[in-house]
């Protein structure tokens, strides 16, 4: 009887071990690409190296929770950070030929949410 209680307790502890952990974005979001071929090319050449690599400490593509505080800063601030650089983000995000509109589209794609104006 006691052994079955201990076994039951161990099963319960094991089942609850994952509770409370922050959910991680699905791995497939790290491989996501914009539907527009031109944006997909820019993303692959300029954004993906950092925004699909957890070791880079950049907000990961599709990780809405990581992007939310950035999105709340507004499109003008995000655009300024993309163009002028911010923390580890290099100026122009390694895309010297990108337009402001392309930057905004790429940010919206990576954040997986619309940008407030």
Image: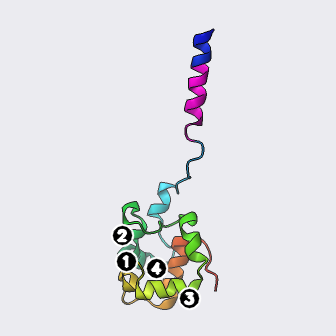
Residue in the picture at 37% in, 85% down: 91
Query: Which stretch did the figure color magenta?
Result: 7-18
The residue pinned by badge 2 equals: 49
Q: Earlier in the sequence, mark 1 or mark 4?
A: 4
Q: Earlier in the sequence, mark 2 or mark 3?
A: 2
Name which quarter of the figure residue 112 lies in: bottom right
Pointers 4 and 2 in contact (C-beta within 8 Å): no
Pair 3/1: label in front? 3
Q: Earlier in the sequence, mark 3 or mark 1?
A: 1
Mark 2: which secondary structure? helix
The picture places residue 20, in percent across and down from the top left corner, at: 59, 46
Q: CA distance from mark 2 to mark 1?
A: 7 Å
Residue in the picture at 38% in, 73% down: 44
The picture places residue 56, in percent across and down from the top left corner, at: 37, 66
The residue pinned by badge 3 equals: 76
| Rendered position, 25 above or below 85 | above
Choose between 34 and 68: the one closer to the eye.
68
Pointers 2 and 1 in contact (C-beta within 8 Å): yes
The residue pinned by badge 1 equals: 46
Residue in the picture at 40% in, 84% down: 85
* Extreme residue in the top direction: 1
Q: CA distance from mark 4 to mark 2?
A: 15 Å
Mark 1: which secondary structure? helix
**Magenta span includes 57:** no
Q: Quadrant of the C terminus?
A: bottom right
The residue pinned by badge 4 equals: 39
Q: CA distance from mark 2 to mark 3?
A: 24 Å
Choose between 51 and 87: the one closer to the eye.
87
50 sits to left or right of 27:
left
93 sits to left or right of 67:
left
Mark 3: which secondary structure? helix
């Amino acid at each position: 009887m006691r052994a079955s209680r201990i076994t039951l307790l161990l099963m319960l502890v094991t089942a609850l071990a994952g509770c409370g952990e922050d959910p991680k974005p699905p791995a497939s979001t790290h491989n996501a690409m914009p539907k527009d071929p031109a944006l997909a090319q820019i993303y692959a050449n300029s954004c993906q190296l950092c925004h699909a690599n957890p070791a880079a400490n950049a907000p990961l593509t599709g990780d809405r929770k990581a992007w939310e505080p950035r999105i709340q800063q507004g499109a003008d601030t995000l655009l300024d950070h993309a163009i002028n650089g911010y923390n580890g983000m290099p100026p122009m995000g390694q895309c010297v030929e990108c337009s402001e509109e392309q930057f905004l589209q790429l940010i919206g794609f990576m954040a997986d949410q619309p940008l407030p104006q």
